[in-house]
Amino acid sequence: MARLATVFVLLGVVLFAASCAQPATGVSVEGAWIAAPLGESDSASGFAIIHNGAGADDRLVSVSSPRAGEVMLHEMNMDGGLMTMRPLEGGLRVPARGDAELAPNGAHLMFMGMESALVMGETVPVVLQFEQAGVVSVDFTVSDHAPTADAHKTHD
């Protein structure tokens, strides 16, 4: 009887520990925003900070949104004094227990073939596909500037 009680206690400890554990994906997104396009443009740039709490590197491999015909990972670089933009081959590495930033003048998202004009302050649903974490859905807010750090703080 004592042995059975020990098994139940151990089972309870394991279940409690599992319920307190970090989500299996380990990925979260903070400060997601889309730069309000100028004029009648059907494309826009998206930015965010991707946190990876997992113990292994991950990689953002694709992005989609029902509001865009296509969403591509791009990077901007200086090449001989000229700013160039091109697709980010192989996706965006998100280091274990680290961050990757999608930012102006660096790696970013390009929303192409927007189905309708973006409105300042609206949210756009975006699906991020990671190699390890799988699918992460995020709402990006249309803005003319990056949100402040406190506005989107998700953890201490």
Image (tube, helix red, strand yellow):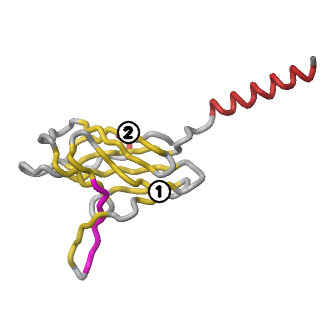
Going by the numbered disc 2, the residue's amino acid type is: Ser
What mark, if any, has residue 116 been given in the picture? none
Q: In the figure, 92 relative to 46: above or below?
A: below
Which quadrant is home to the N terminus?
top right
Categorize mark 1 by other alpha carbons within 10 Å: few (<14), some (14-19), many (20+): many
Residue 73 part of the magenta segment: yes
Q: Give the residue at mark 1.
A: 94
Going by the numbered disc 1, the residue's amino acid type is: Val
Can you tell which quarter of the image residue 29 is in?
Answer: top left
Q: Position of residue 52 (x, y in %)?
A: 50, 50
Single out the residue that lies furthest toward the right. 2
Which residue occupies 15% across, 41% down?
A: 115
Pick the front one: 28 or 112: 112
The overriding secondary structure of the stretch rendered in magenta is strand
38 lies left or right of 143: left
Q: Position of residue 80 (x, y in %)?
A: 24, 82
Residue 111 part of the magenta segment: no
Give the residues drawn in magenta, as a range.
Answer: 72-79
Categorize mark 2 by other alpha carbons within 10 Å: few (<14), some (14-19), many (20+): some
Q: In the figure, 95 relative to 8: above or below?
A: below
Q: Position of residue 148 (x, y in %)?
A: 33, 46
Q: How many marks?
A: 2
Can you tell which quarter of the image residue 118 is in?
Answer: top left
Which residue occupies 19% across, 51% down?
A: 112
Q: Give the residue at mark 2.
A: 137
Which residue occupies 6% across, 50% down?
A: 39
Q: Position of residue 69 (x, y in %)?
A: 20, 47
Single out the residue that lies furthest toward the left. 39
- Comes first in the chain, label 2 or label 1: 1
Which residue occupies 13% across, 49% down?
A: 42
128 lies left or right of 22: left
Pick the front one: 78 or 70: 70
